Amino acid sequence: MSVRAAVIGLGDISALHLDAIVAMPDAELVAVCDIDQARAAAASDRLGVPAFTDHRTLFAEAAPDVVHICTPHAAHAAAAIDALEAGIDVITEKPLARDPRQAAAVVDAAARSSAKIAVCFQNRYNTPVRAAKELLDSGELGAITGAAGTVIWHRTPEYYQASPWRSTWAGGGGGLLMNQAIHTLDLLRWLVGEVQSVAGTAATRALPIEVEDTAELTLTHENGIRSIFYATNAHAANDPITVSVVTEHAELFLSGDLRVTYTDGRVETVTEEKSAGGERAYWGVSHERLITDFYARRGDSEPFWITPTDGARLVDIIHEVYRGSYPEQIAQLTEME
């Protein structure tokens, strides 16, 4: 029997989820949802499934087994909680929620529910990233001594005008850190270890938006290791994301591919083994891998391995920086709850 799938939120990122559902022989798209009635109707015509403008109505009438949450950030938590309480499995885009209070509510709902939930930190599925994780976990490289990450990208005012929620605290819960750089922060946490504390600043330096376009962070991990991080959307181009992890016996450098430079002079490289197809091929294959893996593990007794606790911790880390950089805005955001 096919798994009945539905997609809530039909913006850009939904294309990757729709492609992945269509590619799985044991999955069937049964409904879509968007608060924009015209967008929902267009998707219904294109995909040949019913469209809804309210996710609760979708749950009641379409009876999905899995929902994919691709809405603006502020709507993630409510849709996830409603699905979990209805016993429907959830794949949600990042961030888990707009703010720490909402994120904690999703974690609590997941703990009470028999349904599974995954957060889309899909870069963990990139072949070079997984190779780096395996090397670090093997102990072959010795202890980690430090790490660094960068996201140096380009966004225009028009990017935010096209989806205005991205430029606001109420809609996005933040800017660069919540929307773009969160994936690289997740990799630092996953590869190096849990983050114990963070110091840093976020600022609106170049773009006409409420939220930050630039940030610098120093993360102290529970094992005492320090990692540093810099991100901006104010560059003239989208440079490759980088993650560097230094160990006793080698340095691992991720920038698309993985380059491992050993202290004895050896150099090894791991490249991505599969190219992407579909409407958003330039985003790679990792979404498809995560989604396929989630569907394959639905019958497992254990929670999915990328947990809502992972998602909530990233929101907490980012908000530690926000509280020091935008205290008035974060106080107002908390009052909205």
Image (cartoon, grey):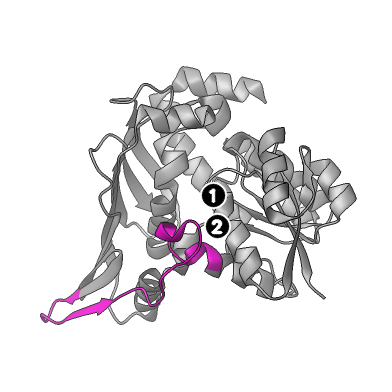
| Residue position for label 1 | 13
The answer to whether residue 55 is above or below residue 148 is above
The answer to whether residue 175 is above or below residue 87 is above
Q: Are marks 1 and 2 in contact (CB under 8 Å)?
A: yes
Local SS, label 1: loop
**Toward the viewer: 12 or 127?**
12
| Residue position for label 2 | 16
The region drawn magenta spans 261-288
Residue 276 magenta-drawn? yes
Residue 33 magenta-drawn? no
| Residue 25 seen | yes
- Amino acid type of the residue tagged 1 in the rendering: Ile
Local SS, label 2: helix
Residue drawn at the location 72% of the way across and 41% of the way down: 41
Q: Quadrant of residue 206?
A: top left
Residue drawn at the location 69% of the way across and 35% of the way down: 38
User: Residue 227 in the image: x percent, y percent?
Assistant: 30, 53
**Toward the viewer: 239 or 184?**
239
